[in-house]
Image: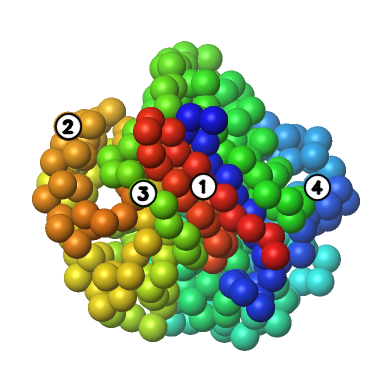
Amino acid sequence: MAGSIYLSEKGKDSMGIVPPRLQPGDEVRVISPSRSMAIIKEKQVEIARNRLEALGFHVTFGKHVHTHDEFFSTSIKERIEDLHDAFLDPNVKGVFTAIGGYNANQLLKYIDFDIIKNNPKVFIGYSDITALNLSIYQKTGLITYSGPHFSTFGMKHGLEYTMTSFIEAITNDAPYEIVPSEFWSDDPWYLDQEDRTFHEQKDYLILQEGRAEGTIIGGNLCTMNLLQGTEFMPSLKGSVLFIEDDDESHALTFDRDLQSLLHLPDAYDIQAIVIGRFQKDSQVTEEALRKIISSKRELSHIPIIANVNFGHVSPIATLPIGGKATIEAKQGSCFIQIEQS
């Protein structure tokens, strides 16, 4: 199928450690390792909780999810306490981040990664949470998930695609397919749930053709670059790189952030790049993307596709960081598959 992506996960012998699948009746814990849940409207929280409970999950909240300071976050100590408590509690099977922000990387030196390694669970979020997704994978080998925040489930309209991919990713081990959604939107839905604008989605954009396979590494590009030169940065060797950015990015910042990543020692062995759809305010056009990619000779030999359903434009797919991907892009169609075994 044109513009399709296939994903699956497998065990630690060949890649990262797959956390136990979520099942009806499981407790999922919501924590706020970046911004506080206090900024989320009460009605949105109610919708999100009801959605997850309709799937059979029991939703609980960290002790400090509503605490906030002048930066709409809370202390490192309180955020670490909620993170550790969620992984230490044997009743909790999944850890959901409330929302993104700017400061999740403050936590990295204070996380007891042995707690996470010894209590593997589904951990999911995106945007600023990329710092935690990648760090946990790097330090423990646990596959984490770039996917919806808890607050995302508070979206009243246009969530079906996001829900389907989320369920496929965290409730079973079978391969799952990601095709272009029928529509996309980047409006501020959290301000007015009834005033939504949806645009027709076309096939994914092939920037360079080819076939490759490798380990899924990535998330929010500018957050990912915060880890460069630290013990928390996964190797890019043999990776299929998934990257996206929000409306604070534009063509020039995306170009230099990507170039910075390509200066890393293992970047020569990136096997393929998949780019999430940009928000309109970023003004990163198809023409600009083609110019940026064509200017980088180090990427000339690998497949690259763009306008994929992940990141800050809804709906979004759920991606396993540490999963294995095979990507093919040629003759107007693209295909990615991750084998289970």
Residue found 56% across the figure and 39% down from its top: 178
Residue found 21% across the figure and 35% down from its top: 284
Is residue 7 depicted above or below 163 in this figure? Answer: below
Q: Earlier in the sequence, mark 1 or mark 4?
A: 4
Residue found 25% across the figure and 65% down from its top: 261
Q: Is residue 118 left or right of residue 33?
A: right
Q: Earlier in the sequence, mark 3 or mark 2?
A: 3
According to the picture, the residue beneath numbered tag 3 turns out to be: 210
Q: Which mark is residue 57?
A: 4
According to the picture, the residue beneath numbered tag 1 turns out to be: 336
Give the CA separation, mark 3 to mark 2: 20 Å
Task: Using a 10 Å C-alpha cutoff, classify the residue at mark 2 as few (fewer than 14 neighbours), some (14 to 19) or many (20 or more).
Answer: few
Task: Using a 10 Å C-alpha cutoff, classify the residue at mark 4 as few (fewer than 14 neighbours), some (14 to 19) or many (20 or more).
Answer: many
Quarter placement of the C terminus? bottom right
Give the CA separation, mark 3 to mark 4: 41 Å
Residue found 46% across the figure and 68% down from its top: 134
The image quadrant of residue 22 is bottom right
Front label number (1 vs 2): 1
According to the picture, the residue beneath numbered tag 2 turns out to be: 287
Front label number (3 vs 2): 3
Quarter placement of the N terminus? top right
